[in-house]
Image (spheres, rainbow, N blue to C red):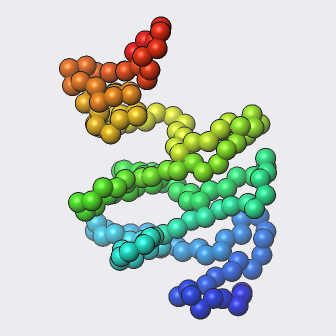
Amino acid sequence: NGQGDSRFGAYVTAPGQANGATGLFAEMPAINGGADWNRAVFGSITSGRGYAVGVQGSSFNTTPSNQGRSYGVYAQAGNANMNYGLYSTLRGTNRGAAVFGNAAVADNDPSVLFNGQWAAYFLGRGYFSDNVGVSTNNPLSRLSVNGDGNNLYGAYITSPSQGNGSTG
């Protein structure tokens, strides 16, 4: 449904803009027995110099708006033994993050659902199996804020300044 682009192995343009329209839909039949991995869509690229992206999602309005929602990647999972809306594994020996978020917007409009900018925003409970650090790369306490902490304490909070009346 379009002229395509020679830079892409496959180029799909949605035929319309009706409610629920989809540019590309991939569906696999139910897995019958076994523990094989089946994927509706799989992206893989060998990393070299520069940026390498296995699967990329993008949703962006050129003009700011208080209406609608944009999701770069949207995932659902449910009714299986284990359910993950998004699952990520960091491999190799170099530094990195299994999930990385970067808020590159400045929105302080109180009518917007998430008043402000967030690299991550969670509704509901969160679970961490190891120490959590805020403004530290090496949390030694279960919760370390503004410093590494100490493994003798469950939570270790250091005052960010040493001014008159500051409390850790």
Name the quadrant of the N terminus. Answer: bottom right
Could you tell whether 108 is left or right of 98 in the image?
right
Name the quadrant of the C terminus. Answer: top left
Q: Residue furthest front?
A: 163
Q: Position of residue 52 (x, y in %)?
A: 43, 72
User: 66 or 151, which lies in front?
Assistant: 151
Q: Position of residue 69 (x, y in %)?
A: 70, 52
- Relative vertical location of residue 60 with respect to residue 25 in this rendering, above or below: above
Using the rendered image of the protein, determine whether residue 105 is visible from the camera's viewpoint: yes
Using the rendered image of the protein, determine whether residue 80 is visible from the camera's viewpoint: no
Could you tell whether 35 is left or right of 104 in the image?
left
Q: Position of residue 17 (x, y in %)?
A: 78, 71
Q: Position of residue 166 (x, y in %)?
A: 46, 12
Q: Residue furthest top?
A: 165
User: 32 or 73, which lies in front?
Assistant: 73
Could you tell whether 6 is left or right of 13 in the image?
left
- Relative vertical location of residue 49 with respect to residue 145 in this rendering, above or below: below
Residue sitting at 63 percent across and 88 percent down? 5
User: 96 or 113, which lies in front?
Assistant: 96
Residue sitting at 52 percent across and 67 percent down? 56
Residue sitting at 37 percent across and 53 percent down? 97
